[in-house]
């Protein structure tokens, strides 16, 4: 019997299994985000969804060398954890200078194709944040699973 990383984490109360970036049989939004973030978290999963949508709009693939992601957020853990989901979905990283977190008063993300200059600016909806910030630890996985399946229009919008 094989056990997915996510099921192992739930069964044994741990956030990640070393050496596994994600499970092929699991939900990448949950598995990849947990591998980066350290646990499955609905706000980080929302970040994954932002990056996933942006890749489609920019017609780029995960890990593409032209990607640049900048996440703007107040210096709070819950709002800055969006960047972990963005990293998981886009394959960008601080180490290769394609991923940055900038302290700001408002929360939004800019995903850009450095080669063409095309970019998308996205922000989480206030209603989404109100419903999902401060999720109790015991509910993180179930709420994150719900976020991974929600329509994008209920999670975020483009920012002018």
Image: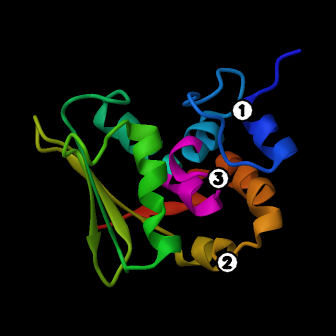
- Magenta stretch contains residue 41: yes
Of the numbered discs in the image, which one, if any, rests on residue 134? 2
The image quadrant where one finds the C terminus is bottom left
Report, in whole angstroms, how far the alpha carbon at label 3 lies from the one at label 2: 15 Å
Q: Quadrant of residue 105?
A: bottom left
In the rendered structure, the answer to whether residue 83 lies left or right of residue 69 reads right
Q: Earlier in the sequence, mark 3 or mark 2?
A: 3
The image quadrant where one finds the N terminus is top right
- How many other residues sit within 10 Å of disc 1, few (<14), some (14-19) or many (≥20)? many
Q: Which residue is at 66% across, 35% downward?
A: 17
- Magenta stretch contains residue 149: no
Q: Residue furthest bottom?
A: 105
Of the numbered discs in the image, which one, if any, rests on residue 63? none
Q: Earlier in the sequence, mark 1 or mark 2?
A: 1
Label 3: element kind: loop
Residue toward you, 146 or 14: 14
Of the numbered discs in the image, which one, if any, rests on residue 5? 1
Q: Which residue is at 45% across, 79% downward?
A: 76
Residue 62 in picture, x, y percent from top left = 38, 30
Q: Which residue is at 10% across, 35% downward?
A: 115
Residue range corresponding to the magenta coloring: 35-47
- Magenta span: predominant SS is helix
As displayed, is residue 5 above or below residue 94? Answer: above
Q: Earlier in the sequence, mark 1 or mark 3?
A: 1
Residue 74 in picture, x, y percent from top left = 37, 80
Residue on which the image places disc 3: 39
Report, in whole angstroms, how far the alpha carbon at label 1 lies from the one at label 2: 25 Å
């Amino acid at each position: 019997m094989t056990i997915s990383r996510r099921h192992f984490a739930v069964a044994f109360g741990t956030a990640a299994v070393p050496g596994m970036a994600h499970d092929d049989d699991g939900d990448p939004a949950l598995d990849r985000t947990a591998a980066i973030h350290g646990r499955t978290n609905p706000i980080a999963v929302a970040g994954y969804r932002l990056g996933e949508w942006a890749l489609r709009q920019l017609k780029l693939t995960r890990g593409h060398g032209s990607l640049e992601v900048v996440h703007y957020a107040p210096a709070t853990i819950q709002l800055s954890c969006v960047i972990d989901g963005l990293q998981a979905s886009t394959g960008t990283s601080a180490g290769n200078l394609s991923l940055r977190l900038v302290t700001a008063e408002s929360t939004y993300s800019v995903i850009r194709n450095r080669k063409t200059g095309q970019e998308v600016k996205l922000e989480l909806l206030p209603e989404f944040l109100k419903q999902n910030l401060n999720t109790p630890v015991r509910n993180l996985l179930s709420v994150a699973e719900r976020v991974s399946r929600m329509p994008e229009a209920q999670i975020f919008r483009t920012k002018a």
